[in-house]
Image (spheres, grey):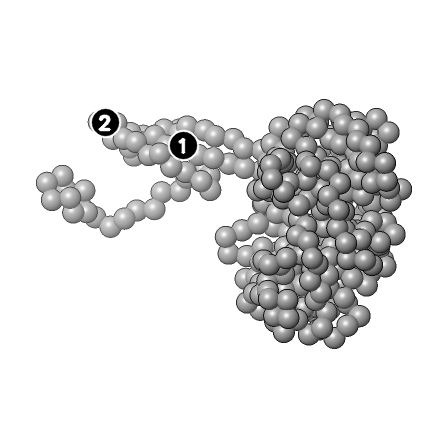
Amino acid sequence: MDQTSGTPAGSPEPLTLPASVSGNFAFSRQGEMTYVTTTRSYRLVAVPFDAKSVRTGAPRTLFGGSEEILTFQPSPDGRMMAYTTGGVVQEDLFVIHCDGTRMLQLTNDAAKDRGPIWSPDGKTLYFYSNRDGDYQHWSIRVDGSGLARITDERGLARIGARNIYTPVVSPDGRTLAAQTERSSALVHLDRPPDRRVEKIPVDLNVPQWSPDGRYLVGAYDSVTFSGPGAGLTLYTVASRKSEKILDRGLAPYWLPDGRRVLFFDEEELGIIDIVTRQVRTARFDPLPGVAVDVTAAMPTLSPDGSTLYMLQTVEQGDIWLVHPGRANS
C-alpha cells in the first residue's frame, strides 16, 4: 500500500492459510504477520446405557472427520447410521455402517436436507428439506432411489403453516409426528397429500412415539431446562388429550418397555415412569465437546435402549507467524 494515499501498490495476492477459519491478523514493524486459526472435527460416539442404574459406560468412537455432522439417527437394527452434513451452501444425506465403512451419499444438490429418520423396516428414510422452496417432508430409499415429496403446500395451509420439520415415524410406519412453525402435527401417509397433515393441540419439541403408538412425549419448551411452560408433556393420540408429566427435562426417549421415558436435565440423566410418575436420576457428565442443548444435535437412544449416540465436536486453536518472503512458520 502507498502509505500516503492508501492506494494499492499492486494487484492483490492470495495467501493460502492452513485452516478454514482464520482471523485476528496483526503486523509487526518488520512486516511479520500473526494470526489465529480454528479447526474443528466431528465424530459420532456410542455410549453404553444401563436403564436399571441410569448410568452410562465408556464411550467409543464410531466415525467422523472434518465435515460437520448436523443430524443423525441409527437404523432399527443398530447396524447403520443415517446422517446429514452441515454446510453454508448445501446439506446432504448419507448412510454409513456404524463401524465407519460402506458410506453412501444419497443426496448431492443445493438443498438443505435434515433430520433423517428410518422407517420401521429399515428400507426408507424420511427427512425434511427445502429443495422445493419451503421445508417439506420427503422420503428416499436407503440405496438413494425413489426420492419423493410427502407433504405439500395445500396440506400445510389447512393448519396455517408453510414449513414442516423433524419427522418421527410411528411404530406401524403409517404416520409421522412433526413440528411446523405454528404447532406440532401428524402426517398420515395413507391419505392424499393435501389431506395428510393434522394439527396437534399441544406444542411438543420433536415428539417421540411410544412403542405401541398410543402416545407421544415431547419437551414442551426446548429452549430452557426450566421455567414457565418447560417440562415433558404426554399426548394421547386417540383422545387428543395432553398432560404435563414433569416440570423439567429435555430430549425425551421411550425405553423399550413403553412405560418409562429417558430424559436429560442439565447435569443429570433421568427416567420417569409415566404411570406412577416416579423419577430416578443420576449424574450425567457430557463428553468434552458434547453439548446437550437446542443448538447442537441432541443425543439419540438406540431402539433397544442400550446405547446413547452423541455428536462430539473437537476444536483446536493455533497461533501462526508469517515472515515476509518466507514460508509460513
Q: CA distance from mark 2 to mark 1?
A: 19 Å
SS at badge 2: loop
SS at badge 1: strand
Give the labeled residue for mark 2.
30
The image quadrant that residue 94 belongs to is bottom right
Which residue shows up at 27% across the image and 30% down it? 27
Give the labeled residue for mark 1.
36
The foreground one among 219 and 127 is: 219
Quarter of the image with the C terminus in it? top left
Which residue shows up at 16% across the image and 47% down it? 7
Question: In the image, which disc is placed on residue 289?
Answer: none
Q: Looking at the picture, which amino acid does disc 2 mark?
A: Gln
Which residue shows up at 23% across the image and 27% down it? 30
Q: Position of residue 155 (x, y in %)?
A: 66, 71
The foreground one among 125 and 180 is: 180
Mark 2 Cα-neighbour bin, 10 Å: few <14, some 14–19, many ≥20:
few
